Amino acid sequence: MSSTDTADSAAGLLARAEALAPVLREWAPKTEEARRLPDEVLELLRGTGVFRMSTSREWGGPELTSMEQTRVVEALAYGDASPAWCAMIGSNTGLYRNFLDPAVAKEMFDRPDMISAGFLPPAGRADRVPGGYRLSGRWSFGSGITHCDWVTSGAFVFEDGEPYASPDGSNPHESRQFMVPRAQVELIDNWHTTGLRGTGSCDYTITDVFVPAERAYTFDVVHGRRSPLTQPDTFLRALCGVPLGVTRAALDHARQTVLDRVDRRTGTSWADGFRARVTLAECEAEFNAARHGVYGAMTRQWEVLAAGGTLDDLDPVERAASPLAWLHAFRTSRKVVNRLYDLLQTWSINTSSPMDRWLRDTATMCQNLSAQDAVLESVGAYLLGGRPAFGITLGII
């Protein structure tokens, strides 16, 4: 194995992410104040190799498994949620390559560690014109868009002013993803939020921009070699590493704080108290169950796909396990951090305390669609033989 291969291995990436975590925590106040990733933080992330971790071997990337990618995101989130969130979003560039013609992808992504961002649900309008589309619209939550190279946006397709139906009749109003250079996108500086403040997840607009047909794609058409990373749900998998990493950080912080504190009225150690012992133990149990649920479902899915199977080869309960585990990780993170915040009482409330930021970050990340009841409704519909409205979480287009 060459030195380059070693550097880009899962172990190498994870080690660099773990080493960077305390640095990210030191930068966290400045990152929040900037409401985007400072240039210094962006370059530190780039140096870990995280933005190329999902890139396939054919493109010179390490092609980390979904489990390995999630562990890297966890390690970064242990330091600060915002850089970890942006790192995961930006690393999806390697996944998007799989849904574009190889020659087009090679031209677009002509250097390592290029970053994509955007909003995938169809919120815009794309009118068919000779050679491509005219794209317009306004999209929200463009995490990482302040520092990306390409913006990918979902839009409904129109032709001659009418909704464009798929030629095979499968979709009465087709939607696609459209790749646009960042320079052709206008940002709206409206990211003033409770948490995840450093992600720069502002709204953006695209106005009558021509998108060549070859830069439009869908997640049901794979170009090149199929792999476990060419599934429709691929880009959703590692995001749950953010709440898991934050929760682990909060648990470690709370345990150390308890060990260091003495009740000033009684002179007894907090560590000897019933409340602290029970709370920490219960929170560890909640976290362990959520984390093992994520990796258990993800590993089973990967085994089937790596053996040449498809998501349809999973039984319904196995297929449902992944989106449910992602949602559970988000909600468990918020629950555990809230309990630990209460446990530490006034040692939590100052802005200098990481508990303050973790409380706000977990509250905000739970508003992401991956943590919403739409996932539960869709999984329930699937398990009952119905059509899930948010089928992409199950890998259903």
Image (cartoon, rainbow, N blue to C red):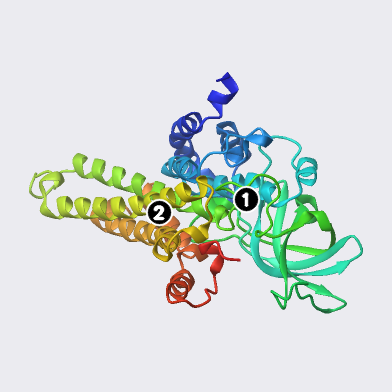
Q: Amino acid at mark 2?
A: Ala
Quadrant placement of the N terminus: top right
Task: Give the vertical position of 191 relative to 372 (above or below).
Answer: above
- Residue drawn at x 48%, y 72% is 378
Categorize mark 1 by other alpha carbons within 10 Å: few (<14), some (14-19), many (20+).
many
Quadrant placement of the C terminus: bottom right
Q: CA distance from mark 2 to mark 1?
A: 28 Å
- Residue drawn at x 78%, y 44% is 108
Q: Which residue position holds label 2?
A: 297
In this rendering, does residue 349 appear at all? no
Q: Amino acid at mark 1?
A: Gly
Q: Which residue position holds label 1?
A: 144
- The one nearer the camera, 19 or 349, is 19
In this rendering, does residue 275 appear at all? yes
Categorize mark 2 by other alpha carbons within 10 Å: few (<14), some (14-19), many (20+).
many
Q: Closer to the camera: disc 2 or disc 1?
A: 2
Residue 224 placement: quadrant: top right
- The one nearer the camera, 346 or 292, is 292
Q: Residue furthest top?
A: 2
Q: Position of residue 177 (x, y in %)?
A: 71, 61
Numbered marks: total: 2
